[in-house]
Amino acid sequence: MKRVLVAGVGNVFFGDDGFGVEVARQLAGPMPTGTRVLELGIRAVHFAFELLEPIDLLIVADCMARGGAPGTLYVVEPQAEAPPPALADAHGMNLSIVFATLQQLGGTLPPTRIVGCEPATIEPGIGLSTVVTHAIPGAIELIHDLISRQEAS
């Protein structure tokens, strides 16, 4: 049985930055055996500790500004990089810091895919923009596809 962790991250108090959290909420139903879905929000250290458990695939749902049109979905494989010198931020989620914290705790990053969505706004405010809200079903479909590929391998 393959072990998959789907982590929804982001700050729900900054508009579309809450994308990953909403994806995790909508995934909170029956999932394939061995798959866990966690709504982690901005709990970076908690996330790092979760990654100490052995898993075969990590899928992160997150807001991701890459220059595309708002609502554009991306699937990104993060590249290894030097650990950042900063500590976890109590008001945001920085995946580089999570991955560096994991390394400092003695863990190893599993194969990872980030399902990201181009934001329309990350200004203070609660609630996703309409275009990002409409992107959620596509993100969920991408996540299920990634899980299916993992199960088949």
Image (cartoon, rainbow, N blue to C red):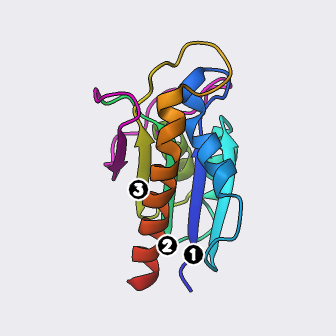
Query: Tag count in the figure?
Result: 3
Nearer the observer, 3 or 146: 146
- Badge nearest the viewer, 2 or 3: 3
Numbered mark located on residue 113 in the image? 3
Image x and y of residue 90, in percent: 68, 25
Span colored in magenta: 67-95
Residue ID at (56%, 44%): 101
User: Which is more N-terminal, label 1 or label 3?
Assistant: 1
In the rendered image, which quarter is residue 125 located in?
A: top right
Q: In the visual, does 113 lie left or right of 61?
A: left
Characterize the local packing of mark 3: few (<14), some (14-19) or many (20 or more) Cα atoms within 10 angstroms.
some
Q: Residues within 10 Å of mark 1 (few under 14, many from 20)?
A: some
Q: Residue 65's spot in the image, x, y percent? A: 37, 28
| Residue labelled with disc 2 | 56
Question: Which residue occupies 68% across, 38% down?
Answer: 43
Q: Is residue 84 magenta?
A: yes
Amino acid beneath label 2: Asp
Residue at point 60% right, 32% down?
18
Q: CA distance from mark 2 to mark 3?
A: 11 Å
Q: Secondary structure at mark 3?
A: strand
Secondary structure of residue under mark 2: loop
Callout 1 secondary element: loop
x and y, in percent, of residue 74 in the image: 35, 45
Q: Is residue 15 one of those drawn in magenta?
A: no
Q: Which residue is mark 1?
A: 3
Quarter the N terminus occupies: bottom right
How far apart, in angstroms, are the residues tagged by discs 2 and 1? 5 Å
In the image, residue 77 lies at what x, y percent?
Answer: 33, 53
**Which mark is first along the chain, 1 or 2?**
1
C-beta proximity under 8 Å, tags 2 and 1: yes
